[in-house]
Amino acid sequence: MPDLLEQIRAACIEAKVEPNADSISQIVRSLYPATSHADLVELVEEVLSSINGLGPLEELLFLPNLTDILVNRFDDVWIDRGYGLERTQVKFSSESAAQEFAKRIATRGHRRLDEAQPFVDIQTDTGLRFHAMLPPISSSGVAISIRTPLRISLTLEDMVAAGNLESETYQALCELIHEQKSFVVSGGTGSGKTTLLAAMMNKVRTTERIVVIEDSAELLISHPHVVRIQARLANSEGAGGITMTDLVRQSLRMRPDRIVVGEVRGKELSDLLLALNTGHKGSATTIHADDAASVPTRIEALGLLAGLPREAIHAQMHSAFDAVIQMKNSRDGKRGVAEIAEFTRSPNGSVTTQPIYKPRLITRVA
């Protein structure tokens, strides 16, 4: 079934048709012309039920390069395909239908979504990251955010071919990997941080072991020696949760050459800094920041939340990370690298960043 589903996905995209019973029937007929009518009906029903069950949002999953589906209210649906947000004509029949849809998805993830628990954050079996919030917390109606996983693992070469990386930028990124520099990929939501990080990890030597730690599985790394570990939310009774901090600590016992944290956003920063100060050169993470100069401040804030003294944060930050790769603002309409900067330490002990490469200048900055 997975192979057939991918065939049908590809055929729908190529033919630019909506994935409904009629179109899927025609596709199945073309792929398997000897299928009997009874088998055809059963197969179409099975395919439709297996394509995530997202109701009116289903057809959007077939769009190439889709990263996000955003429902602001039942009749206001937007998508992101890497070129900024686009409004769609897709809508639910009513507010109640949209809320019932959100509750059904939450139930599949063994979570509650009701008046007592008006928001939920889960990852579906198919890899979709699903977040929903109900009124009155969401005043305009149910708000749904769906992050879709990458279907293929992009390489840096793919990005050069697509025009998202200049050749000089490509060479600078390859140097960071080959010289085992530890780095942070920073940028806003939808700027392509995860995609670039995965593509860079694809360039790691095959003799190295990569341990990937994520809150939700998003990094698609094509490498022969990758171990993936993922955090887990507590159940409805508040038990069974596995935090990112737990996983960073456990990763040190897994003989990693490089530790990759999908995104650092909490107290796990403390353990990550400690880990990178004991070796594991060439490790990496992503972080939300508007520009490279803001990254040290952002790391400091997370370190303070973890209970570290400011002086210790800056000392460990300078030893742990070598460079920041800043992504372009997604509002610019095209993803790519805005600049590469290095961590430097001032005489007073504070860490700042200094640009060492800006693609648009095509020159190294002294």
Image (cartoon, helix red, strand yellow):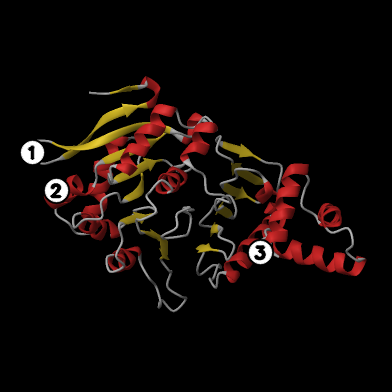
Farthest right residue?
A: 37
Front position among marks 3 and 2 = 2
Residue 109's image quarter?
bottom right
Whole-percent x and y of residue 76?
Answer: 64, 45
Three-letter amino acid code of the residue under disc 2? Ala
Front position among marks 1 and 3 = 1
Name the residue beneath numbered marker 1.
Answer: 348
Front position among marks 2 and 1 = 2
Answer whether labels 2 and 1 touch (C-beta < 8 Å): no
Residue in view at x 86 percent, y 56 percent: 29
Q: Which mark is residue 315?
A: 2
Mark nearer the N terminus (3 vs 2) = 3
Judge whether residue 135 can be spotted in this image: no
Q: Nearer the viewer, residue 190 or 228?
A: 228
Q: Which mark is residue 100?
A: 3
Above or below residue 229? Residue 330 is above
Is 344 positioned to the left or the right of 150 in the image?
left
Mark nearer the N terminus (2 vs 1) = 2
Secondary structure of residue under mark 1: loop
The count of marks equals 3
Answer whether labels 1 and 3 touch (C-beta < 8 Å): no
Three-letter amino acid code of the residue under disc 1? Asn
Is 179 positioned to the left or the right of 241 in the image?
left
Secondary structure of residue under mark 3: helix
From the image, which quarter does the N terminus lie in? bottom right
In 3D space, how far apart are the residues under numbered discs 2 and 1 (Cα atoms)? 11 Å
Q: Which mark is residue 196?
A: none
Residue 79's image quarter?
top right
Three-letter amino acid code of the residue under disc 3? Glu
Residue in view at x 24 percent, y 42 percent: 322
